[in-house]
Amino acid sequence: MQAVHKTRHVIWEMDVYPDVAIELGVFPRDSRVSRTLSRVASWSRRRADSIIVIGEEMKVRLVRQGIPAEKIHVCENWADGKEITPRPFPDGALHVHYSGNLGLAHDIATIREIMLALRDDNRFRFTFAGGGSRRPALESFCKKHRIANAAFTPYAARADLGMRLSEGHIGLVTQKSETLGSVVPSKTYGIMAAGRPVLFIGPGDATPARIVEEFQCGWHIEPGDGAGLRDLLQTLNSHRPLIYHAGARARRAFEQNYDRRIGVARICNVLAQSQQTHAEATRET
């Protein structure tokens, strides 16, 4: 189709498939289905003029699969800084807030461990707003163990998302280590837009961990480090200004790097570069 219509082929990888499905056990690693899908995906990527990925770790993964680095462009995701704006921090218990899909790619074991440890401590609250395939199991776990300071609410309407994100003191983002490079948790940007610090439970080479370190706008915990998470939450509860200052840095970093107009401009720049390269190649032929 590219040759016939003389068009450009640009792939925008939001998740890297079939890698994520294989890593999460949806497809057996050495099955015929996995091998076939991998070959098809690789063929398409090799023939593309450009590939847009949403994190450096995605680029690393594709380069390791033999995709030329020069055709891969990192364009991190964004949120709408006009729809989602900072609101005052709430009073009361330290509130850890998770918003969005809670699926197979998300680590729940670590947060489950800390909720169990703090279930009788009314200084802490945990809210999970949204849905996803792993949410019912987490909700059942909380009911079984009578974790009264955990709440589960529906997805927020788009118009209410900013208000809902601001209900917490800290925005929770999680990722399983095995999905490094196949997914990038994009809920990070909405949390930052709301002026809330990010608590990322996931691999240290993931985009949210890099953002937290670069902008000092939250905290990173490796999956399985329940003791470290408990110490962190207790420290933050005793020193609330750490949360407020990290939230302010989150919003500032968002405005400078991840607002919608900036994110869209990154995509447009890649498309413009691809157009220029295509035009030059056409003239040469």
Image: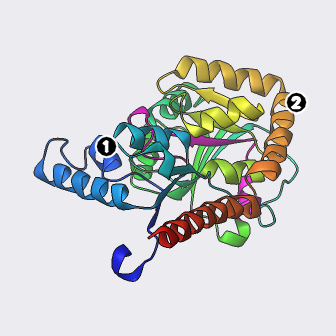
Q: Is residue 56 above or below residue 133?
A: above
Q: How far from the left and from the top, in percent, is residue 276? A: 59, 66
Q: Is the residue marked by circle 1 packed among few (<14), some (14-19), or many (20+) residues within 10 Å? A: some
Relative height, residue 165 to residue 144 (above, below): below
Q: How is the image coloured?
A: rainbow
285 relative to 96 in the view: left or right: left
- Residue segment shown in magenta: 161-186
Mark 1 lies on a secondary structure that is loop
Residue 189 picture location, percent across and down: 68, 51
Q: Position of residue 33 (x, y in %)?
A: 15, 54
Picture coordinates of residue 13 (x, y %)?
46, 57
Q: Amino acid at mark 1?
A: Leu
* Earlier sequence position, callout 1 versus callout 2: 1
Numbered mark located on residue 24 in the image: 1
Task: Identify the amino acid type marked 2.
Answer: Pro
Label 1 to label 2: alpha-carbon separation:
39 Å
Q: Residue furthest bottom?
A: 5
* Of the two numbered discs 1 and 2 in the rendering, the one whose residue sits closer to the viewer: 1
Based on the displayed image, in which of its 4 quarters is residue 243 positioned?
Answer: top right
Front-most of residues 30 and 119 = 30
Q: Residue at x 65, y 18 (%)?
A: 231
As for residue 174 lying within the magenta part, the answer is yes
Q: Is residue 36 left or right of residue 275?
A: left
Which numbered dot is residue 143? Answer: none
